[in-house]
Image: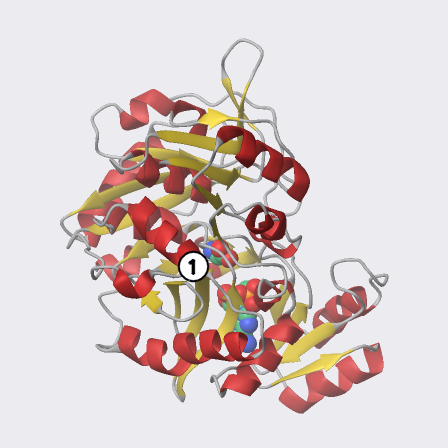
Amino acid sequence: MKVLVIGTGAREHALCRSLSQDPAVGELHCAPGNAGIARLATLHPVDQLDGAAVTALAVRLGADLVVIGPEAPLVAGVAEPLRAAGIPVFGPGKEAAQLEGSKAFAKDVMAGAAVPTARSYVCTTVAEAAEALDAFGAPYVVKDDGLAAGKGVVVTEDRAAALAHAEACVGAPPGSRGRGRVVIEEYLDGPEVSLFAITDGTTVLPLVPAQDFKRALDDDRGPNTGGMGAYTPLPWAPEGLVAEVLETVLQPTVDELRRRGTPFSGLLYAGLALTSRGTRVIEFNARFGDPETQVVLARLRTPLAGVLLAAANGTLDELEPLRWSEEAAVTVVLASEGYPADPRTGDPIEGLDAAEADGTAFVLHAGTRVGADGEVLTAGGRVLSVTATGADLAEARAKAYAGVAKISFKGAQHRTDIALKAAR
Ligand code: AMP
Ligand code: GLY
């Protein structure tokens, strides 16, 4: 089987790593990829948002499956021309991807499917936003309606800061990512869980839950980021969580989207808060989470390509139950100086081979590129995800941080508390 993966991140590197270990995969391609993926797959310098170019590449390669990793090409509708060309695609079409692309759309689907989520108002003026903030009170939650790579959400006790973010979102010109709308919602307390499910639009297969660390700094301080680390399993999670979320969130959402004539196939990501009043959806994403994928796939024992192809072909109901390792997995993100606001790039990275030398950890690349002399350079905000498995979280964590300690680049930053509380 020939597989083409679209994207550039550590999530795509993790997908490529699992696909390269699947004996059914004979050829692996990635567009555009990064310096780490280049070791596993043939890279193609194609603009991932250009549906015609991606389709032309897939046709030329004779791809049996295209896996679209990030949200931007999904929301841009890259899946459509691929499907029109008869190529199986893992990832939803443009309309269903609005589940992630528009928070207002997601809220509407959840209301239609009676999925538990935070109460919210969609506001188009600053005056409306101010009223909504006062209706809920502090802490305030203010969300850019459109895609913002995890950085469009402000959670704050400071009303002026909340209103300023609302104003920035509402002030966005029509057609830009926020489209002049802002979502103000009720604050959800309690721990967060990321639960992914693979679906073909009808059958829903949940994966194992993971936890992401969204804030930039230790002890959940600093700004929201795309995610600074993750682990699985969650020893503290209530028994039956996955079954409950399948029944109350995942299946009803997939059914509702099918009912609306926009069936969702691909990866449905539920970001959940386990509040004192029950499980609530914080957000949906239309693709694998980054960095949670790095740890979830590290535990998946079923060969990945067949699962993704069954989702693309609508035959998930024929699949054997997924098999999982009992091991724990931890990933720690190394980010550039200035991430998330203003990441510095172009610095040489040292110690990549050393970090993997004894097989304890493996390094997944995000923002990296190969320089003129073959050296690996930083090329983005999140640079690497250092991942390890172990008999328990403490062991996986120790191995991942041992890998992190061997890597250096100018201004590198990482959290030191990934999986720390859970490991205790
Ligand atoms: P989102 O992009 O919607 O996932 O939001 C990013 C992060 O902001 C989430 O992972 C939460 O940590 C936080 N957040 C979002 N919505 C809420 C909410 N209603 N209550 C509390 N925290 C939230
Ligand atoms: N780790 C959060 C996300 O992928 O959206």
Q: How many marks?
A: 1
> Taking 364 as reference, is 101 left or right?
right
The quarter in which the N terminus is drawn is: top left
Residue topped by disc 1: 219
The quarter in which the C terminus is drawn is: bottom left
Residue at 30%, 22% in the rendered image: 354
Image x and y of residue 213, in percent: 43, 57
**Residue, far top:** 373
Q: Viewer-proximal residue, 58 or 49?
A: 58
Image x and y of residue 289, in percent: 45, 55
Image x and y of residue 173, in percent: 86, 61
> Taking 422 as reference, is 11 left or right?
right
Image x and y of residue 122, in percent: 71, 80
Q: Viewer-proximal residue, 303 or 157?
A: 303
Image quadrant where residue 404 sits: top left
Q: Secondary structure at mark 1?
A: helix
The answer to whether one can see residue 36 in this image is no
Image quadrant where residue 421 sits: bottom left
Image quadrant where residue 319 sits: bottom left
The answer to whether one can see residue 318 in this image is yes
Disc 1 residue crowd, few under 14, some 14–19, many 20+, Cα 10 Å = few
Residue 131, placed above or below residue 32: below
Q: Amino acid at mark 1?
A: Asp
Q: Is mark 1 within 8 Å of ligand 1?
A: no
Residue at 45%, 64% in the rendered image: 268
Rendered-image quarter of ligand 1: bottom right
Q: Viewer-proximal residue, 260 or 408?
A: 260
Q: What colour scheme was applied to this rendering of the protein?
A: secondary structure
Q: Viewer-proximal residue, 136 or 388?
A: 388
Residue at 65%, 36% in the rendered image: 53
